[in-house]
Amino acid sequence: MAREYMRILVVDDEQNYREVLKMILTAKGYDVDTAGNGQEGLDLLEKGAYDVVISDLKMPVMDGYAMLQQIRQRQYDTEVIILTAFGTIEKAVETMKAGAYTYVTKGNDPEELLIELEKIGEIRRISRENRMLREKMVGDYMLESRNDRVNQMMRLAERAAASDSNILILGESGSGKEVLASFIHGRSSRARENFMELNCQSISESILESELFGHEKGAFTGADRRRIGYFESSDGGTLFLDEIGGISLNLQSKLLRAIENKKIYRLGSSNQISVDFRLITATNRDLKKDMEEGSFRSDLFYRISTIVLEIPPLRRRREDIPLFIDYFVKKFSYEMKKENIQMDPEVRRVLENYDYPGNIRELKNLIERLLVLSDQGEIRPEYLPMDMARFLPGEGGAGASGHGAAGAGAAGHGAGGAGRGDMAAGAADGAADFAGTLKEYRAQAEKAYIQQLIQKHPDDMNRVAQILSISRRQLFNKMVEYGLK
């Protein structure tokens, strides 16, 4: 089995000692940074994560014991090994009581330290595998389905997992693309190795390249230390790039070369590094349309899409909604230590018939909200969000006129989801009180619908435009026309 990849920080005020130790550890395959005292060490820990800190006990500015206390107080996920001289062993034992993993006597055979690092690596590997097993159990449940299309997709995913072929997962936001990618990794021959996940839309273009390829110290302004990128960290395992559709053409070309050659260069380095990874990508965009418009490379598309898996939105697998409701109620009941939760039948009817434009993620967040608000083991109608409460009988909206969430489910199978069904019903209820022209009435309904979508997706105007099937520019013009913000 390959040595567990770990980032190590060596903290010692003796420059020669820490540089020699860095050489020894680097030769063993560890990624090593150094600091001259405890304060410098904390500054580096603030900037990036380390698996292990190896620290001298006696240092100026801040000693190893004070740094250990700060590491535990700040709850950094790192183990600490204390280096000590013969005369300070009693103090080193105190550091173990304060949370250090162990201590090693300076001047002893370096093999003693290497053995301790091997132990830590094995502990972290087992911990990671246990976490992946828990996630896999959750993923397995979330991927259970009564829907023929989903089950067919899962059979294909099972077969694809046995290969090293590149996989492209398509689906709307919140539909479970990350869960499916993790499921595939867990079923593959690489399951015991790293599963590295990166959302390409969550960070800026310049940072994304550094995150993917890594960089050397001094590669650019602010690069004060070497950084291992996601490609290297995925060596032997799986790299999952989510929302790949929005990256620039320049970065697409670099990504294509890395995928084809399985070789990369860190930013600021001319040394070629071989990497062995399995690639899974995902997007909620129409990449074929992007190719036609010239914003996505066709050669990259065909490289990443050896196998394509498409997850249907939740509104098109309605028979699975009761499964998810029951699962998330059990999950959050357990986490919140709430027992014997009872859900009002009307609440369940609304939940089962709502269209969920945010898909499984929206349903999950909604169930969590209901469990937080539940009192004396009851989930009552008044706990529903306002845009769903209108579907309840007697509310004077869609539910009262028999066009509630079920009506939205029947009418709202487009991207707009429940909003379209309840909008039509609400408009019918309010028409009798309106005295303007048809054009004015249509404008009023359009304004109300756009406002509802903006409130639902306040930070994602792309999503609002997508639901409305118009461009962002057209959406902006409508917002100006109707005075919406």
Image (tube, helix red, strand yellow):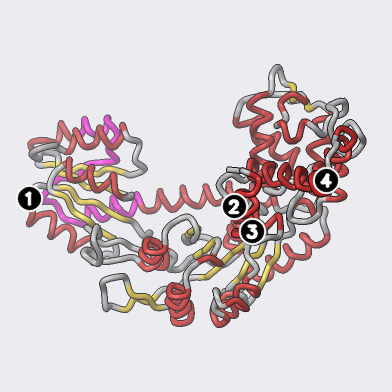
Query: Closer to the camera: disc 4 or disc 1?
Result: 4
Kindly identify the residue that appears in the image at 28 percent across and 60 percent down.
31
- First reached walking from the N terminus: tag 4 or tag 3: 4
Q: Is residue 315 visible?
A: yes
- First reached walking from the N terminus: tag 2 or tag 4: 4
Binning the other alpha carbons within 10 Å of mark 2 as few (below 14), some (14 to 19) or many (20 upward) gives some
Q: Which residues are magenta?
A: 93-120
Badge 3 amino acid: Gln
Binning the other alpha carbons within 10 Å of mark 3 as few (below 14), some (14 to 19) or many (20 upward) gives few
Kindly identify the residue that appears in the image at 26 percent across and 62 percent down.
226
Q: Mark 1 = which residue?
A: 14
Circle number at residue 461: 2
Badge 4 amino acid: Gly
User: Above or below — where is 33 with respect to 248?
Assistant: above
Kindly identify the residue that appears in the image at 19 percent across and 62 percent down.
24
Q: Could you give the CA–CA distance between mark 2 and mark 4, rounded to whole angstroms?
A: 21 Å
Q: Position of residue 59 (x, y in %)?
A: 10, 40
Q: Could you give the CA–CA distance between mark 4 and mark 3, rounded to whole angstroms?
A: 23 Å
Query: Closer to the camera: disc 2 or disc 1?
Result: 2
Query: Closer to the camera: disc 3 or disc 1?
Result: 3
Observer-nearest residue: 152 or 173?
173
- First reached walking from the N terminus: tag 2 or tag 1: 1
Kindly identify the residue that appears in the image at 42 percent across and 59 percent down.
204
Q: In terms of secondary structure, where does tag 1 sit?
A: loop
Badge 1 amino acid: Glu
Q: Mark 4 = which residue?
A: 421
Observer-nearest residue: 127 or 362?
362
Q: Could you give the CA–CA distance between mark 4 and mark 1, rounded to whole angstroms?
A: 71 Å
Does the residue at mark 4 contact the one at mark 3 (Cβ under 8 Å)?
A: no
Q: Mark 3 = which residue?
A: 474
Q: Position of residue 205 (x, y in %)?
A: 41, 63
